[in-house]
Image (tube, rainbow, N blue to C red):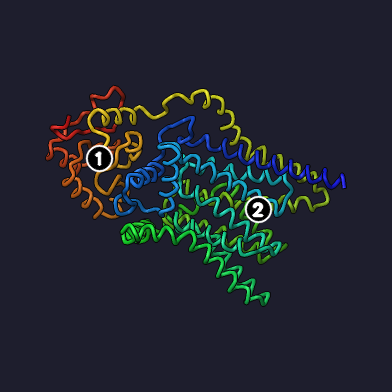
Amino acid sequence: MWDSVKKIKKDDLERLAVAVFIIAAAFILLLKSPLHFWLRGDAETDSSVYKTVALMISRGYMPYRDSFDHKGPLTYLVNLLGVQIDSYCGVWVIEFIAICVTFAGIYKISRLRCERIISCVCVLVSGALLYDYFEGGNMVEEYAMPFIAVSLYIFLDFFLNRKINRLRLALCGGCMGAVLMLRPNMISVWIVFAIAVLIDCIKRKRAADLGNFILFFLLGFMIVVGPMLIWLAVNGCFGAFVENYIQFNMVYSSAKDRGDKWNAGFYFINKTLIIFSLLIVAYLCTVKDKFLHGTYLVYMLVTLLLISMSGMSYAHYGMILVPAVAFPVAALFELAAAEKNGKTITLFMLLYFAGVMAFPKWFTTAGDLVNKYSDRAVDHHSDMVKGVCELIDENTNDDERISVYGNGDIIYLVSNRLHATRYSYQFPIGEIDTDIMDEYFEALENELPPIVVIWERQADERIEDFLSEHNYMEISDLSSYDLGKTRVFRLAGQD
């Protein structure tokens, strides 16, 4: 009996140690975020857009209708929740939770194959990919990762251990709904594994189970998706949601030719860990659990296909591959342990994965921990952003709207000003749909915002003509900061 009590205590301590490890790993990784409370730096381009839409919502406006963007509504609701925590850095808390859940999901996936210590190494190895993919964080892929990791674990546990219940089914459906409300080309895990479950049930002559599976999966899906669609419909912007999120994204994804998509595919596959994982799964297809590993190989390939379909080689698109690589790595450790000299092989594998593929990247951030804490009181915004916002504060009131021409939504956030017109930014969306530029300039003519900022090198003949025609005066030289290529214009007669 005493041995049983000691074993329980040991298990509890080990679980606690794993939880602390996951929390610490998430915190260290997120030192890369400019939205960290110690940093408060310039949010990256996409992150600034999402935060700007959330700022508009917090002032009573709606996404799509009043503030154009083409991501799913959950993106802006996540950022809105962040605004309630802290007007600028609050979304970092949501990022932290998302990364913790992602790492916990990766750990659980690895535990299907490995013991605790090796599973923790799998977390570090998988998480090391984020050093290439993170790009400042607060991306839709970052928020998709926990939902993908949780669902991937549920599917794998079903195929390996036949564990399934109504709660898991609903949770899996809810996860798919959440990812659909972020961006639709990230749902490969549900596409592939749902088909695999269908085939499996038919093969095992358990077709009767499918009705139960579908019912609770759809229940979870509607619990997540339903309220968001109702919110949009009640506030009169469901049509704008369809136009921006569905129709515009179809145009966006078809804007590139096949060559661009081909190049994007090779860009994402060209990582040592990705190639390694594909080769591991391909090998496993020939030796054990062929149906499961064949499904997994298809899942990874479909994921690569979907993230390449836009033809854009943005690194952050690769974030959804992070949960996918854990299972192949864990499976390789399991294979090694089963060999005659399993302990020796496993040791060398640990040294390789930890010492070569994981630790060098993690140590880079961990080594900067003390410096970032020491500089926590320093204003980390760039001189350009501080200079532009200084001019905005001196020349406008808090309730006056401004317009940034280009893609510099960080200005709205730091100056705490709402954007004029429906478009907080115009590029690259105006190049994809030229009607957007016409609508923007028409609204600009009607609203005549007191300040127009030309972001970096985005000046062109059309905006120059508008500024000249309406007597806007450049005041960039009045700033005490170096604004670089960014220019600030004030409407004549403004105090």
Left or right position of 71 against 333? left
Give the mark nearest the N terminus, 2 or 1.
2
Q: CA distance from mark 2 to mark 1?
A: 48 Å
The quadrant where residue 233 appears: bottom left
Left or right position of 114 against 135? right
Q: Is label 1 in a helix, a strand or a loop?
A: loop
The spot of residue 280 in percent (x, y) is: 66, 55
The spot of residue 105 in percent (x, y) is: 61, 50
Q: Say few, some or many: other residues with alpha carbon within 10 Å of mark 2 (under 14 / 14 to 19 / 20 or more).
A: many
The quadrant where residue 472 appears: top left
Q: Which mark is residue 109?
A: 2
Q: Is residue 251 visible?
A: no
Q: Say few, some or many: other residues with alpha carbon within 10 Å of mark 1 (under 14 / 14 to 19 / 20 or more).
A: many
The spot of residue 476 in percent (x, y) is: 24, 28
Write down the residue under mark 1: 401
Q: Is label 2 in a helix, a strand or a loop?
A: helix
Q: Which mark is residue 195?
A: none
- Whether pointer 2 and pointer 1 mark residues with C-beta atoms closer than 8 Å, the reply is no
Q: Nearer the observer, disc 2 or disc 1?
A: 1
Q: Is residue 176 visible?
A: yes
Q: Is residue 355 above or below residue 229?
A: above
Residue name at image x 58 percent, y 57 percent: 151
Left or right position of 287 against 34? right
Amino acid type shown at disc 2: Ile
Residue name at image x 67 percent, y 60 percent: 157
Residue name at image x 44 percent, y 52 percent: 74
Quadrant, the C terminus: top left
The spot of residue 294 in percent (x, y) is: 63, 64
Amino acid type shown at disc 1: Arg
Tell how many labels.
2
